[in-house]
Image (spheres, rainbow, N blue to C red):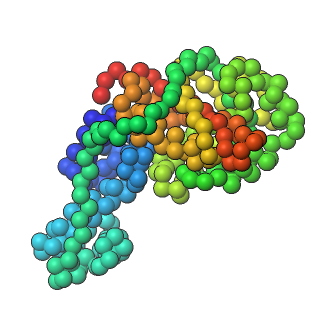
């Protein structure tokens, strides 16, 4: 993954003005888009889209300082109008593009480069689990993306589960982990801007293909899963572990994401408020190359 991150940066720099830059970049580096976006965000703290916008405006600022025309620069970096470019540039830099050359005032956003650094002292426990064909059975809805704190829409989804549905889940539950799980999938492609949505399902794992009580079912093929146990303040520890999976584990592991779906379960400690044991499960395949 580290190699592909740097390969992506090189492609971005060579094609900053390209209209369909991101889709062409993913074809060039031959990687799964969802996983790449998650890793990129976990490491940098910004989305890939935001990074490309910052790099385009940084290069635009440099050329405007050298005397290039606002019109030429706007169209060179993919803006459909001078007004649109001017608004974006002022929001980013604090001044209008027409003022850059006069004031000789620019702004720089440097190109990224990804390297491995040794921080030490912080282990990450995981296990590899082989799973048969199974189904998730439960209730679901589209919810807003959220990366910190409690997602109130997921709370409302949990509160909507009827007694009959809970009884049916209990009947269906017949493979490990025998817990009520939270499943996230079908995220918007522009995810991690906290403005998109994903589908969230609350339910159980089962090998039974027929379900009742109005429950939905989601089939999964047999395959390999990486399991990450974690324990501590909830939901911080769970969310921090998820971020570390993408920013640390996937960079060096012998596995890569099989697809974008993941699930977790949480067991609250009755004797310690806001403290819990959780597990995060992600589908993986062996990483046989860069």
Query: Could you say which quadrant of the image residue 286 lies in?
Result: top left
Rendered location of residue 85, percent (x, y): 31, 71
Viewer-closest of 272 and 66: 272
- In this orientation, does residue 208 appear? no
The residue sitting at 57% across, 31% down in the picture is 229
Number of marks: 0
Rendered location of residue 158, percent (x, y): 75, 45
Quadrant in the picture for the C terminus: top left
Q: Which residue appears farthest toward the left when viewing the image?
A: 66
Viewer-closest of 287 and 229: 229
Q: Give above or below for 162 relative to 49.
A: above
Quadrant in the picture for the N terminus: top left
Q: Give above or below for 49 relative to 140.
A: below
Q: Which residue appears farthest toward the right when viewing the image?
A: 164
Q: Give above or below for 152 relative to 96.
A: above
Viewer-closest of 276 and 6: 276
Query: Could you say which quadrant of the image residue 88 lies in?
Result: bottom left
The residue sitting at 20% across, 77% down in the picture is 105
Left or right: 53 in relation to 179? left
Rendered location of residue 77, percent (x, y): 26, 62
The residue sitting at 52% across, 56% down in the picture is 194
- In this orientation, does residue 211 appear? yes
The residue sitting at 42% across, 28% down in the picture is 256
Rendered location of residue 136, percent (x, y): 68, 29
Left or right: 173 in relation to 27? right
């Amino acid at each position: 993954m580290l190699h592909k991150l740097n390969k992506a940066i090189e492609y971005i720099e060579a094609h900053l003005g390209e209209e369909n830059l991101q889709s062409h970049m993913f074809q060039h580096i031959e990687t799964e888009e969802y996983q790449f976006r998650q890793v990129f965000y976990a490491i940098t703290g910004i989305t890939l889209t935001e990074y490309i916008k910052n790099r385009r405006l940084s290069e635009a600022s440099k050329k405007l300082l050298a005397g290039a025309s606002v019109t030429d620069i706007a169209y060179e970096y993919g803006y459909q109008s001078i007004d649109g470019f001017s608004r974006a540039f002022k929001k980013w830099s604090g001044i209008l593009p027409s003022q850059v050359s006069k004031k000789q005032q620019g702004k720089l956003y440097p190109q990224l480069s990804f390297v491995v650094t040794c921080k030490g002292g912080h282990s990450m426990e995981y296990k590899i689990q082989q799973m048969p064909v199974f189904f998730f059975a439960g209730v679901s809805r589209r919810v807003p993306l959220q990366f910190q704190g409690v997602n109130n829409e997921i709370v409302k989804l949990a509160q909507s589960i009827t007694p009959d549905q809970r009884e049916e889940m209990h009947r269906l539950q017949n493979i490990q982990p025998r817990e009520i799980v939270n499943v996230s999938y079908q995220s918007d492609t522009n995810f991690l801007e906290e403005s998109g949505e994903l589908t969230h399902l609350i339910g159980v794992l089962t090998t039974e293909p027929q379900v009742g009580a109005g429950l939905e079912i989601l089939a999964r093929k047999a395959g390999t899963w990486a399991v990450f146990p974690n324990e501590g303040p909830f939901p911080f520890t769970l969310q921090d572990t998820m971020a570390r999976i993408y920013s640390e584990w996937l960079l060096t592991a012998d596995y890569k994401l099989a697809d974008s779906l993941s699930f977790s379960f949480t067991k609250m400690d009755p004797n310690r408020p806001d403290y819990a044991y959780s597990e995060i499960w992600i589908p993986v395949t062996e990483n046989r190359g860069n």
